[in-house]
Image (spheres, rainbow, N blue to C red):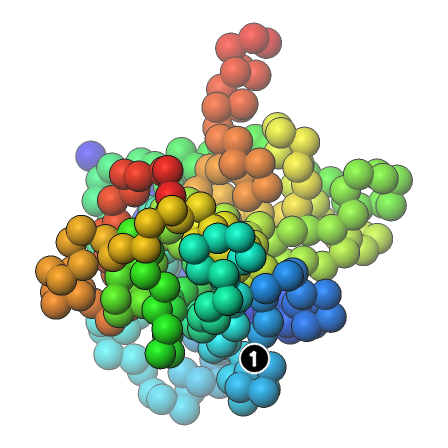
Amino acid sequence: MASMEKRLQKELLALTKDPPVGVKVNTDAITKNLAEWTVDLEGAPGTVFEGENFQLQFKFGSRYPFDSPQVMFIGPNIPLHPHVYSNGHICLSILTDDWSPALSVQSVCLSVVSMLSSCKEKKRPPDNALYVKTCSKNPKKTRWWYHDDSV
Amino acid sequence: MGNCLKSPNTDDISLLRGSDAGPEVSSEQSANMGPPPPYQESIPIYHPSPNVSRPANQLTEEEQIKIAQRLGLINHLPTGVFDGTSKKAKECCICMEEFLLGDMLRFLPCMHTYHKDCIDDWLMRSFICPSCLEPVDAALLTTYETS
């Protein structure tokens, strides 16, 4: 537990001091609970999400960074993207199978922004209706099939 | 086939580090609570895959073999003490702390270096280098074949 908090403190400091473009941590909410973060993301200029704002929620377990964080979109604007379900769940392999403890909140945010940026057509995943009806609240409990690397 | 991951009192960490790591429940705690019910006896938790945690007695035979092999392979990876001479290895990217003089390190075949405790914890879940995603055992096996 202690090592998880120490690392999160480090990440928080680095991310507030030197945030990547379009990524902003909501530090007010974090002071209460280090295990739950909200990050504001901006749609990158020149992409279909230009001018849009999104909120990404991170939940860290006591075994972070050995276990991946639980990451999903929350709030009023869930990006209309073939890998993002309408309940905010994201189909992105680094969030489960391809997680590595060398990844960080910053690298996850950049991967999500990059995933959004490569989208050409705004649409939901084809199985959205069924998935949203049947899935667990925790996206990490989903057995994801990573079958499409193009978006 | 016998159970190669026996003993409820030694966990994966203590097998790796010697006897310094005690059981997770402190003696103070257990004194307050009285003897634990049988099903709460401290059975070591293993991580056959990342994000999967299972007590030793609930592992499949396949997982037991996998973990036993990992323990063996980890012990073949070189270790050392950080003496400040390496210009390349400065920080452990698992805990994000800078290496300090005297820290115990472990060196992977891909030349990535971590704190011994940090990387051993990860290697018990996955044999992929966190930095370059190179499979650690593939490199080890090639070393065996060529030497």
In the image, B144: left or right of B82?
left
Could you tell me the amino acid type at mark 1? Asn
Give me the chain letter of mark 1.
A
User: Image height check: is B113 above or below A10?
Assistant: above
Residue at horizontal 46%, vertical 37%?
B127
Q: Who is closer to the viewer here, A126 or B34?
A: A126
Judged from the image, the secondary structure of the residue bearing numbered disc 1 is loop
Q: Quadrant of residue B86?
A: top right
Q: Who is closer to the viewer here, B42 or B67?
A: B67
Q: Which residue is mark 1?
A: A26
User: Image height check: is B10 above or below B72?
Assistant: below
Where, quadrant-wise, is the C terminus of chain A in this rendering? top left
In the image, B18: left or right of B112?
left
Could you classify mark 1 by the number of other residues whose Cα lies within 10 Å: few (under 14), some (14-19), or many (20 or more)? some
Report the label total.
Answer: 1
Q: Position of residue B124 (x, y in %)?
A: 45, 46
Would residue A89 be seen by someone viewing this image from the given angle?
yes
Q: Quadrant of residue B25?
A: bottom left
Would residue A99 be seen by someone viewing this image from the given angle?
no
Residue at horizontal 59%, vertical 64%?
A22
User: Image height check: is A84 above or below A100?
Assistant: below
Q: Position of residue A31 (x, y in %)?
A: 59, 86
Residue at horizontal 58%, vertical 87%?
A28
Q: Who is closer to the viewer here, B41 or B123?
A: B123
Q: Position of residue B8 (x, y in %)?
A: 34, 59
Q: Quadrant of residue B100?
A: bottom right
